[in-house]
Amino acid sequence: MDYQLRAFLVAMLVLECLHFSAVMATDPDPLVDFSPDAHNFTLRNIFMNGDVSHGPGGTRAALDTKIFPATTSQGITYVQFKMVPCGINLPHTHPRAAELLTLVSGGPLQVGFVDTNGVAHIDILHPADITIFPRGMLHFEQNVGKEIAFYISALDSQNPGTLTSAGALFQLPTVALATALNQTGKAVTALNSTLYAYGPSLQMSSVSGCVPGRY
């Protein structure tokens, strides 16, 4: 086999591997029109019939395939929020999905994410504004207004995953985390005792400077 032919075959193999990786990075394409378990294509009142959780910062109502089987294999997840003034969705990531967020009413809503260069992209949303959090980026939302912020998030995966930043950090060994934060092990342990319970949740800002309507 001559050199040019070998080089061509290697190049084709690399391209095929890249294509395979790109395909596997997203949800697989559906093989049928919809799930055989999908008998209804409308979900009434997500705040009553969805996966609803309440926190000091407001109410979150989400879908999953058990609650709404029609979403099975469609590569989407959908969440609605009602966030009180000074409420915050704790910084978190979605390792398997990008997120498109729309503020419907109330707020304003402060949002943002940090990219892989360590650059923060922070903005203020008003009703009818839309923002995007790229896949895997650390992001947050906080109601900096005087009214309840009603907003909607759509994610491009059936199972995007949610990893809350502080909760994840404090699962690491104390020595590793103390070194990363340039703190003593004692200081890290003391800080850990003040954290919210691990997991995504809507909380109230504990910062005394949070005044509704001031940002």
Image (cartoon, rainbow, N blue to C red):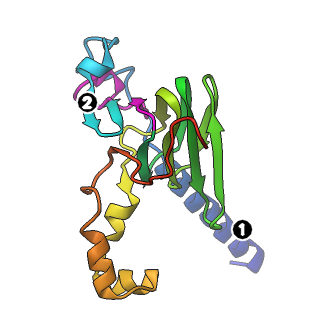
> Residue 182: x percent and y percent?
45, 86
Q: Amino acid at mark 1?
A: Phe
Residue where numbered disc 2 is placed: 51
What crowding class fits label 1: few (fewer than 14 Cα within 10 Å), some (14-19), or many (20 or more)? few
Q: Which residues are magenta?
A: 62-85
Looking at the picture, tell me which residue is in the foreground, 3 or 58.
58
Rendered view: 40 above or below 193: above
Identify the mark at residue 8; answer none if there is no mark.
Answer: 1
Magenta run includes residue 71? yes
> Residue 44: x percent and y percent?
30, 11
Looking at the picture, tell me which residue is in the foreground, 138 or 145.
145
Residue extending furthest toward the right: 4
Q: How many marks?
A: 2
Q: Amino acid at mark 2?
A: Asp
> Residue 19: x percent and y percent?
58, 54
Q: Is residue 95 visible?
A: no
Horizontal relation, residue 67 to residue 3: left or right: left
Which residue sits at x=27%, y=76%?
A: 190
Q: Is residue 174 visible?
A: yes
Identify the mark at residue 178; answer none if there is no mark.
Answer: none
Which residue sits at x=37%, y=80%?
A: 177
Q: Secondary structure at mark 1?
A: helix
What crowding class fits label 2: few (fewer than 14 Cα within 10 Å), some (14-19), or many (20 or more)? some
Horizontal relation, residue 99 to residue 48: left or right: right
Which residue sits at x=56%, y=35%?
A: 213
Q: Secondary structure at mark 2?
A: strand
Residue 81 sits in quarter: top left
Q: CA distance from mark 2 to mark 1?
A: 52 Å
Mark toward the start of the polypeptide (2 vs 1): 1
